[in-house]
Amino acid sequence: LIDRHETGLGFSRAILVNSSALRALKPFGIHTKIEQAGVPFTSMAIRGPHGDIVSGAVGDAAPDGIRPISLPQLETEHCLNQGLSERGITVERPQTLVSFQQDGSHVASVVEGPEGTRTLTSRYLLGADGAHSKVRETLQIDPHRTPEPLGMYSQDAILNWEGEPDLVIWILDSGAVM
């Protein structure tokens, strides 16, 4: 695992972890760290300068009892890093993906860091660095559009539009604030 940031981001973009992500992390025990660090919620509202954008109940907990958790991205990343560390995995920082080539069996990734440039060989390359990633750029995927068809759904929100939410997200011109 590599990350171009020396210590990770110094700010949070995400402010919650959905139950589907928690369920995926459950086999690794990381969901427990996130649940202990954050606050589960049953309803939420997203409010803008002119009132509610959307609000409502999240719905009944699944049979496994997992609910979405309110937790800033920085703290979520801390939980993820702890889980990796417990398994003897470290995130190499700062390392930047320079280029990669793939064939039918592996990917050769050239990365650059404080000690110079080196090549890493793996079965897969996963770029989790957003729309303007080096992976997207190299594969010539336009960062301003998504592949067609675009299908979106959520299993986490069943809105009944009643009552006061226990999580309120305010969206201001400067960003989202809890």
Image (tube, grey):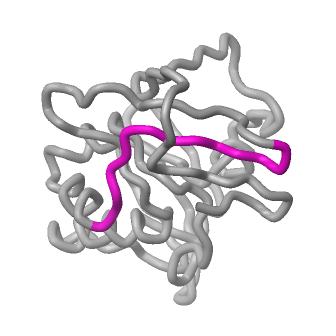
The residue at 72%/35% (across/down) is: 53
Point out residue 84 in the picture as x, y percentages from the top left corner: 25, 66
For this orientation, the residue located farthest to the top is 149
Is residue 20 shown above or below 5?
A: above
Tell me how many marks there are: 0
Closest to the observer, 147 or 1: 147
The residue at 23%/52% (across/down) is: 31
87 relative position to 174: left or right? left
Quadrant (top left/top right/bottom left/bottom right) for the C terminus? bottom right
Point out residue 101 in the picture as x, y percentages from the top left corner: 57, 45
Closest to the observer, 172 or 32: 172
Q: Which residues are magenta?
A: 37-50
**Is 41 a magenta residue?**
yes
For this orientation, the residue located farthest to the bottom is 115
The residue at 84%/44% (across/down) is: 50
Q: Is residue 112 visible from the viewing direction of this image?
A: no
**Is 65 a magenta residue?**
no
Quadrant (top left/top right/bottom left/bottom right) for the N terminus? bottom left
Point out residue 30 in the picture as x, y percentages from the top left corner: 22, 57
Point out residue 32 in the picture as x, y percentages from the top left corner: 18, 57
Is residue 176 shown above or below 51?
A: below
Q: Quadrant of residue 86?
A: bottom left
For this orientation, the residue located farthest to the front is 163
Q: Is residue 100 visible from the viewing direction of this image?
A: yes
75 relative position to 67: left or right? right
Closest to the observer, 177 or 101: 177
